[in-house]
Amino acid sequence: MRILLLLFTCFAILSCSSTPRPTINYSATQQSCVYELIQFKQTVKTQGVQDAQLFWSPDYPSFAFDRFSVALTPQLTSDQSKTQWLNHVSRQAEIQRTIEYQNLRNKQAIDFESQERCAKQLTTSLATNDQFWSQLQQHPPIITSNYQNWQRIIGLYPISKYFATPSIHKEKKRILSGFIEPEDDYTITYATPNKPNLSQQEIQSWFTQATINSDLRWPLLTDDQLTQLLAFYTPEFRVESVSLDDKPGLITYVSDDQAAVNTNEPIVYVDHSFTQFHGRILLQLNYSLWFANRTAKSSFDPYAGKFDGVLFRLTLDEQGKPYILDSIHHCGCYHMVFALNEVLQFAPTSAKIESPTSLHIYRPQSADILKISVSNGEHMIKDVHWGKSSPFARHLTSLNYQTLRSLPTPNGQNKSLFDQNGMLLSSERLERFYLWPFGVVSPGTTRQIGQHAVAFIGERHFDDANIFDTLFLNP
């Protein structure tokens, strides 16, 4: 009882303690823009259409942040690095505002063009504002954790984790055992057609050109280059197909409140992100498959339910070559990490934090594509290897993942697939009732990028800026 009381006391102190933030002395024109941007966000909140993929703060109303951009703030020491960072976070905010504006049910009070002019003016004025840069360095945005401390306190997490650890290790062994099982006879191969004709020399030149004048050595490629890279490196997916639940499809709203997966159109949703790996900024290519359901194995299966899917993230090295592949289900579960380069060595595991399933995958000289096999029903990865492209693959169409943030509905409006907390509520699982002591909100529920907790023991987010620093030794 004393231990529980002490935990509650510590939590209360941490929750109540906060450092007051200084305010920037804006001009009258700038203050008007700040007010307009904050009012827009208030309208968005009132109508319940906030986008949870990026974090927005009234302290920096013309920007939107992810964990990577926040982690860069201590390194912004030169004019060039500040300019690159400002362009990145202001562009993220512009995309987010556009999405939220599209999703508003009532737009009458919003002058969107005026608001966008305001955002650009405010961002431009802050570029040379020393007070702004000082505030940013001393008080960077704090992105909310996807772990709830109160759940861990009430659930007696220090005790619960010891009971859960054997089950976690057993599940990992079960998943790895799938790698030695033969593929189902009804396996369907999917691949994107018309792969760009790129050479490794051309790709490397893109990265060299992008980083040669960057103090941060940040590979900010052009939109066209990114589109070509995403298509060039799209893996070949081999999916065991026992039912319609095993066909990757297109997400649509079939009614004003209900989304579904159209299995008549094989789709891979693509996007890009960045990570820091032992001081280096690396580009990541993201590919996600969506399935209509996770098939029930029995009459009572706590993991089964509507919607399922897998997110594959291919991290490229500084020359644009495949370096690391990691993957999660859209709930954040089943984190798997594959080293694609022989120089990479996994770091020793720690009892303090759950480690992902990890494997080395070596590339033969003759291989030209990464092949990923997925099991039927529960859609687990059961093989990853390099090989030759299949001539009999079904065509897989690429769509931007960002379209899921604003989908058309039958009533002529637009709506995100996810709610204001980044959750797809119709995908809730029964497992949430017994896994809650580990602090993850609604375990098993499909969620948006930026909202993925990937460990029950300890804390780790899929989009942590330095996630691989703890998983790999410095090569």
Image (cartoon, grey):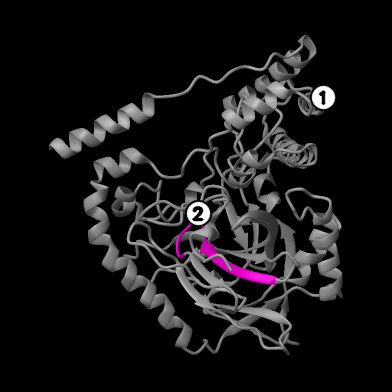
Label 2: state its secondary structure: loop
Where is residue 331 shown, x and y percent of the image? 48, 56
Residue drawn at 71 percent across, 19 percent down: 34
In this picture, is 259 found above or below 106?
Answer: below
Residue at the (27%, 68%) spot, across then down: 166
Residue drawn at 80 percent across, 41 percent down: 80
For this view, does 277 lie left or right of residue 471? right
Q: Report the side of 45 relative to 294 (left or right).
A: right
Q: Quadrant of residue 456?
A: bottom left
Q: Is residue 330 magenta?
A: yes
Q: The residue under label 2 is which amino acid type? A: Thr
The residue pinned by badge 1 equals 121
Q: Main secondary structure of the magenta part?
A: strand
Q: Is residue 387 above or below residue 121?
A: below
Element assignment for label 1: helix
Q: Report if residue 55 is visible in the image.
A: yes
Identify whether 166 is placed above or below 406.
below
Figure check: 35 above or below 232? above
Q: Is residue 167 left or right of residue 444?
A: left
* Residue labelled with disc 2: 446
The quadrant the N terminus occupies is: top left
Q: Residues within 10 Å of mark 2 (few under 14, many from 20)?
A: many
Compare residues 213 and 42 and report the one nearer the observer.
Answer: 213
Work out which residue is located at the far top of the displayed protein and give it.
Answer: 28
- Residue 390 picture quarter: bottom right
Image quarter hosting the C terminus: bottom right
Q: Which residue range is magenta in the image?
A: 322-334
In magenta stretch: residue 231: no
